[in-house]
Image (tube, rainbow, N blue to C red):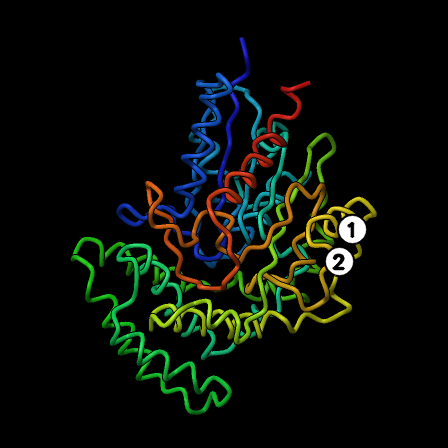
């Protein structure tokens, strides 16, 4: 009888599992379930992990352990971890020999069952965007952007009154003293007011988690992640692979390609802003890559990505870890299914208009490479 495989999808920074019908990994979950059925592995399971969105990597890894205990404690089947963004760091810590979480948590019985770790758009060398969010205004903006994400996934787009007011705010991005917190508060209240009472409570709890515990943010700076890498080692026998994303730099061309729609123009402005912050990666923080990793990047992109290349959130060269499974032209949210393709059922909804051109064929090819890697040992 074939072993029962357990696949865990570990979310990143905006790590809600679901808010009503909103699912962070919805399209990836559907794809993996279909692949399991196609491979005749109907006993195997795919589980989305509920994580504290901006808590420390250690706390988030404890969240992952709790889910694994609840869902994989009844058998000894192999475990596979797929982490997006910060979720990839959670997965690495989970598998690391000797990792210590909270007192009384027994990680090793489950960690020794891990067979593969896949990281998607993960900041293995950190991201300078985290340094911006350490500031008081950055923290308030992060909470508002979190609400933007939830709102767009629920309603498809922001109301025009919010678009124009936030557009005015972003236009003054270079003069932070001119960014009035009262305007942020007004935008926040307007957006939250559009939800039903029940969903508003769920969203408020999620956003409260974002605002109350931001210990993850300093850990994601290039300086903070250096300590994580020094204390987190690969487990022998576990296969490590990564999906790398690189988006187009914002330009007049990408702005024109976004079209005349005010919502698209606003989200492209947000993308341009965070892209600019992410470009500030110190050269000394960029990791060295193996010949095989370098060859994979050159083959995918035509040349080695430069030091400022990124997906709008994480520097591209910071994302490489283990075997490069796929290197794609995509922004930070594209690879998990949040791109613009409303005609697909269920629809793909994009809130970060980057002009990457990433669509369903690229999504399926990316997740096929992940699935093939997970079950590589089964194919031998």
Pick the front one: 195 or 203 = 195
Q: Total number of numbered labels?
A: 2
Which badge, 2 or 1, comes first in the chain's sequence? 1
Identify the residue at image location x=19%, y=64%: 194
Identify the residue at image location x=61%, y=33%: 111
Label 2: element kind = loop
Q: Quadrant for the C terminus, please.
A: top right
Q: Indicate whether 270 appears above or below 247.
A: below
Label 1: element kind = helix
Q: Residue furthest right?
A: 291
Quarter holding residue 346? top left
Q: Are marks 2 and 1 in contact (CB under 8 Å)?
A: yes
Q: Residue furthest left?
A: 197
Instruction: Quickly name the residue at label 2.
Output: 304
Instruction: Quickly name the residue at label 1.
Output: 294
Percent coordinates x, y for residue 316 in the rendering: 65, 59
Does the rendering let one see residue 59?
yes
368 to the left or right of 124: left
Compute the Cα span from label 2 to label 1.
Answer: 7 Å
Does the rendering let one see residue 133?
no
Percent coordinates x, y for residue 208 in the rendering: 34, 62
Quarter holding residue 80? top right
131 to the left or right of 75: right
Q: Indicate whether 187 appears above or below 290.
A: below
Q: Residues within 10 Å of mark 2 (few under 14, many from 20)?
A: some
Identify the residue at image location x=41%, y=45%: 50
Q: Indicate whether 368 appears above or below 134.
A: above
Percent coordinates x, y for residue 292 in the rendering: 80, 44
317 to the left or right of 2: right
Q: Indicate whether 267 appears above or below 196.
A: below
């Amino acid at each position: 009888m074939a072993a029962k495989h357990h696949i865990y999808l570990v979310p990143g920074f905006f790590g809600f599992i679901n808010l009503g019908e909103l699912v962070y990994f919805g399209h990836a979950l559907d794809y993996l379930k279909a692949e399991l059925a196609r491979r005749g592995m109907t006993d195997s399971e795919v589980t989305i992990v509920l994580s504290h969105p901006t808590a420390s990597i250690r706390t988030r890894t404890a969240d992952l352990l709790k889910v694994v205990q609840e869902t994989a404690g009844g058998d000894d089947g192999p475990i596979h971890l797929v982490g997006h963004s910060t979720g990839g760091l959670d997965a690495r810590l989970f598998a690391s020999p000797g990792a210590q979480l909270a007192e009384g948590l027994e990680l090793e019985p489950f960690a020794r069952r891990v067979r593969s770790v896949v990281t998607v758009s993960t900041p293995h060398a950190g991201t300078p965007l985290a340094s911006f969010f350490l500031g008081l205004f950055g923290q308030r903006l992060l909470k508002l952007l979190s609400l933007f994400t939830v709102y767009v996934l629920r309603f498809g787009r922001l109301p025009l009154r919010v678009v124009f007011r936030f557009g005015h705010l972003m236009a003054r991005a270079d003069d932070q003293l001119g960014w009035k917190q009262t305007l942020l508060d007004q935008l926040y209240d307007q957006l939250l007011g559009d939800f039903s009472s029940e969903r508003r409570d769920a969203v408020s709890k999620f956003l409260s988690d974002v605002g109350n515990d931001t210990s993850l943010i300093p850990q994601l700076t290039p300086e903070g992640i250096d300590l994580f890498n020094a204390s987190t080692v690969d487990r022998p026998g576990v296969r490590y692979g990564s999906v790398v994303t690189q988006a187009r730099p914002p330009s007049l061309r990408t702005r024109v390609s976004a079209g005349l729609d005010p919502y698209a123009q606003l989200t492209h402005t947000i993308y341009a802003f965070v892209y600019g912050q992410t470009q500030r990666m110190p050269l000394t923080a960029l990791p060295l890559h193996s010949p095989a990793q370098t060859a994979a990047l050159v083959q995918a992109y035509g040349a080695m990505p430069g030091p400022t290349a990124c997906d709008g959130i994480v520097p591209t060269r910071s994302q490489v870890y283990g075997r490069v499974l796929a290197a794609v032209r995509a922004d930070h949210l594209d690879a998990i299914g949040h791109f613009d393709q409303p005609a697909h059922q269920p629809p793909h909804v994009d809130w970060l208009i980057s002009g990457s051109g990433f669509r369903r064929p690229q999504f399926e090819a990316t997740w096929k490479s992940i699935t093939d890697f997970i079950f590589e040992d089964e194919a031998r």
